[in-house]
Amino acid sequence: MTSPLRVVLDVNVFVRLIKAKREERTGTAAQRIFSALESGRVFGRLAQIGASHRMMDTLSDVLRRLSVPAEEVDEFSRAIIDAMKAGPERLDPHLILGGTPDLTLRDTEDGGVLATAFAARAHVLVTDNLTDFKPLRCENYATTTIRLRDGHNRTLTCHILTRPDALEIVVAHPIDFAAWISEMFDPTPKNVRDRHSNPANVPAGSPNKR
């Protein structure tokens, strides 16, 4: 039996989600992702949202700095926790302990998010800050080129990070992950490598596994 797909959404994805709600926008990548995960099934697999208590505290702090009313912050936090508990593995943020921030990342907060993702044995970490989750030694694949509001193009990437114990996690941008959900593309490390593999995309010293 295929195990549930465990997905950790970075704090910036949740911030985008509540901003879209407050601006009365619909159909954003963050909204489509959260809606799909709330349904409990993506790519034909059961799906489980993961987050730690520390991440929830960080989210609350960020939203308050953005002048989001306390009641709205609490309501949004409860919605995330409810979605976690409703998943097939009934996860609770208080039970996911990320431990020491991953020192391969420059930012301590990002290191804590990555440590949480590994602690939750997540398959995918979704973040808008791709460069912050790109340690020196990781597999790096170009995925999509998007047009920014200022008219410039941006090439999105996804990364595959591997721990010494061989546990792997795919780090993806919300736009890519939302598209993968629509396409029913299951982003396992093997599937990502098969779809995007290009030796030029992989830094020297990184494993280019197939």
Image (cartoon, rainbow, N blue to C red):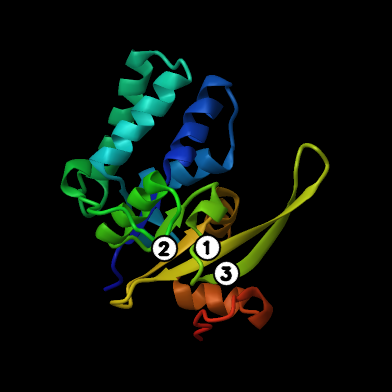
**The one of 47 and 62 positioned closer to us in this rendering:** 62
Percent from the top left, x then y, of residue 121? 28, 62
Quick check: marks 2 and 3 in contact, CB under 8 Å? Answer: no
User: What residue lies at 51% left-to-right and 79% top-to-bottom?
Assistant: 206
Quick check: marks 1 and 2 in contact, CB under 8 Å? Answer: yes
What kind of residue is marked 1? Met
Distance CA(mark 1)–CA(mark 2): 8 Å
| Residue holding disc 2 | 44
Of the image marks 2 and 3, the number of the one nearer the N terminus: 2
Instruction: Determine whether the residue tagged by mark 1 lies in a helix, strand or loop.
Output: loop
- Labelled disc at residue 140: 3
Of the image marks 1 and 2, the number of the one nearer the N terminus: 2
Q: Residue furthest left?
A: 95
What kind of residue is marked 2? Gly
| Neighbourhood count class around disc 2 (C-alpha, 10 Å): few under 14, some 14–19, many 20 upward | some
User: What residue lies at 57% left-to-right and 80% top-to-bottom?
Assistant: 194
Q: Is residue 52 above or below residue 185?
A: above
Total residue callouts: 3
| Residue holding disc 1 | 184
**The one of 50 and 60 positioned closer to us in this rendering:** 60
- Labelled disc at residue 99: none
Distance CA(mark 2)–CA(mark 3): 26 Å
Percent from the top left, x then y, of residue 37? 40, 48
